Image: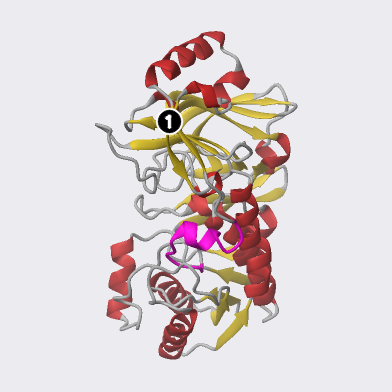
Amino acid sequence: MKRVVVGLSGGVDSSVAAYLLKEQGYDVVALFMVNWHERVGALTSACTWEEDAMIAKMVAKKLDIPFHIVDLSKEYKKRVVDYMFAEYQAGRTPNPDVLCNREIKFDTFMEEALKFDADFVATGHYCRKTEMEVNGEVIHQLLAGKDPNKDQSYFLCQLNQQQLSKAMFPIGHLLKPEVRKIAKEQNLPTAQRKDSQGICFVGKVDLPTFLQQQLKPKTGNIIEVPAKFMEKKKQLETLEENYRKLCFAYPYKPWNGEVIGEHQGAHFYTIGQRKGLNIGGHKEPLFVIGTDVKRNIIYVGEGQNHPGLFRPGLFVEAGNMHWIRPDLQMKPGDKHEFDIRIRYRQPLEKGTIHMKEEGAYFIFHNEQRGITSGQFAAWYLGDELIGSGIIY
């Protein structure tokens, strides 16, 4: 009998994953991971890890499977939270959920799970896995979940073949309402429990308060850039058909606009952000269109269609290109059309990846709003996630 260790989180998805595996005849072991103890910046007092662990234990008891707890908080702080702070300090916006899956759930946690003599490690992610053979070698394919509203393949875009070889996703073929129905039919304690929100394992936090643990407030100027200035510049760039000009963020200068207010630290803001500017007197809302952490300046534009919010492309450095399908890895000089996603829940967008020595230039069929440095771009062929990279 194959043994599967399930990452039981105290949520309905992992609970149903454990139930389905047991029904399929696997020897199932539940393992709950503690990744965060602090409550700094928390917006709610609900759902501490102790409560999650108690509910997960109740689920394990209901399913009659062994239950264990492992504390990975030191690794989580070092490999996820400290990385987050460093990225924000540098003026980039990281994605902690992608990092958590790459560095913790499918690395450190997987190592702990395999100590229980597990053949596989299962999670409650809404995605699927299949295998195929290429030149006599087994290739593991990561596919989008069947539920278009819950597909979480994007969050797993940094996994590799070794990690996928041990992974199982028991609910990837189900819709969320079906998962809820199964939990209710089996009287699982998580059947009516709300889905968790916010930063992976940290929860819903006030981000500036959370970041101020290590990033100090620093007063700087907010500069408004007129839309006319941007429109003229964008037309010139598009006509030049220059990859670098199309894919890199516009290099704003203080003289590009007018000082209209102050902020408490450029590293607290991200492209496309609307809240937290606290500036009135405009017909339409202001949005962040650029940040400069060296000069400590935020550049803003009026209106959700301000041209500064849109770019025709993005760039990923060669060292930050990751291929889930190494057999499809592109070489300098190659170009290929993919369906591309630049954030979770965003509809897939058609674009072409042009591979050069220095990295990959992504040129979209339609300009994209809010391309953000530090986030992950993921590219697909049909339902299959092929690779991902950190946006420059």
Q: Position of residue 205 (x, y in %)?
A: 44, 64
Q: What residue is rendered at 60% in x and 42% in y?
A: 387
Q: What residue is rendered at 57% in x and 25% in y?
A: 251
Q: Main secondary structure of the magenta part?
A: loop
In the rendered structure, the answer to whether residue 127 lies left or right of residue 180 reads right
- SS label for mark 1: helix
The quarter of the picture where residue 355 lies is: top right
Q: What residue is rendered at 47% in x and 58% in y?
A: 207
Range covered by the magenta-colored residues: 201-215
Disc 1 crowd rating (10 Å Cα; few below 14, some 14-19, many 20+) is: many
In the rendered structure, the answer to whether residue 215 lies left or right of residue 233 reads right
The answer to whether residue 165 of the structure is visible from this angle is no
Q: What residue is rendered at 70% in x and 21% in y?
A: 333
Q: Position of residue 145 (x, y in %)?
A: 43, 54
Closer-to-camera residue (325/364): 364
Closer-to-camera residue (346/215): 215
Q: Position of residue 340 (x, y in %)?
A: 49, 36
